[in-house]
Image (spheres, rainbow, N blue to C red):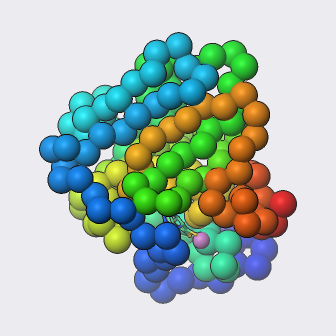
Amino acid sequence: MSLPPGQVPARKFPVFTYVPPAKLPPPEAYRVWVRGRVERPLEFALADLLALGGEQVRHDFHCVTGWTRQNVGWEGVPLGRVLELAGVKPEARWLLAFAYGAYSAAVPLAEALRPGVILAYKLDGKPLPEPYGGPLRLVVPHLYGWKSVKWLLGLKLLDRYEPGYWEERGYHPRGDPWGEERYG
Ligand SMILES: Nc1nc2c(c(=O)[nH]1)N[C@H]1C(S)=C(S)[C@@H](COP(=O)(O)O)O[C@H]1N2
Ligand SMILES: [Mo]
C-alpha cells in the first residue's frame, strides 16, 4: 500500500500524546456530550453510547510528524449515528472535538460525516488501551492523527471554524495527508 507524501511506516503503533488526559472518570461515570448547533443536546453514559452499535474500520493512521501505522483495526460507534440522534442543524459546518484534558481538534463537518469516522472503543480486537485514548476516542482515519482526539469528552457543532489545540498553533483546519495539509 502506498503512503501519503512525506510519511514513513512505523514498525509498531506509537503512543503519541502531547497533551495528556485530565484524571479520567471510572468507566461507569464516563460521559460524552454533544452540543452546539444540534436540535437535541445529548449526554451519553459510556455503556449507552456503546449500545448504539459498533462498526469495524481498518485504515492506515498518519501522524503529521511523519509516521504512518499501516492497517490499524478499530471498532467504534459511527459518528454519523450519534450526530443523527442529536439532529445536526442545517447551519452546522464544523465539529470541535474535546478531550478530557486541555486538548481539542477541529474537523470540517463534511469530513466528520464520511464513512469510517467512529468513536472507537477497540483497537485490534481488544478494549482500547488508555494510552491510545481508551476508553473512547474519536478516529478520523482519513485525516492526520491529531484530529483523532483521545479520551473523548464531547462534540460541539459549530456554524463557523474555531481552531482546536493544534490548529491554534498553526496546523491545518482540515489536515488531509494526501494533500499534505500540515500547516494552515
Ligand atoms: N487528548 C489527546 N488526543 C490526541 C493527542 C493528544 O496529545 N491528546 N495527540 C494526537 C496526535 S498528534 C496523534 S498522531 C494521535 C496519536 O494517537 P496514538 O497515541 O494512538 O498513536 O492522537 C491525537 N489525539
Ligand atoms: Mo500526530
Residue 123 visible in the current orientation: no
Is 72 on the left-hand or right-hand side of 6? left
Which quarter of the image is occupied by the C terminus?
Answer: bottom right
Q: Quick one: 164 or 68, which is closer to the camera?
A: 164
Q: Quick one: 52 or 125, which is closer to the camera?
A: 52
Which residue appears at 65% of the width and 48% of the height? 106
Indicate the position of residue 29 as horizontal and vertical percent values: 19, 44
Which quarter of the image is occupied by the N terminus?
Answer: bottom right
Indicate the position of residue 180 as horizontal and vertical percent values: 80, 66
Q: Residue furthest bottom?
A: 11
Indicate the position of residue 112 as horizontal and vertical percent values: 61, 39
What count of labels does the image hold?
Answer: 0
Residue 67 visible in the current orientation: yes
Q: Is residue 51 above or below residue 10?
A: above
Which residue appears at 66% of the width and 45% of the height? 107
Is 43 on the left-hand or right-hand side of 28? right
Which residue appears at 63% of the width and 60% of the height? 165
Q: Is residue 28 above or below residue 129?
A: above
Indicate the position of residue 113 as horizontal and vertical percent values: 60, 34
Ligand 2 quadrant assignment:
bottom right
Is 42 on the left-hand or right-hand side of 162? left
Which residue appears at 55% of the width and 35% of the height? 156
Q: Quick one: 72 or 20, which is closer to the camera?
A: 20
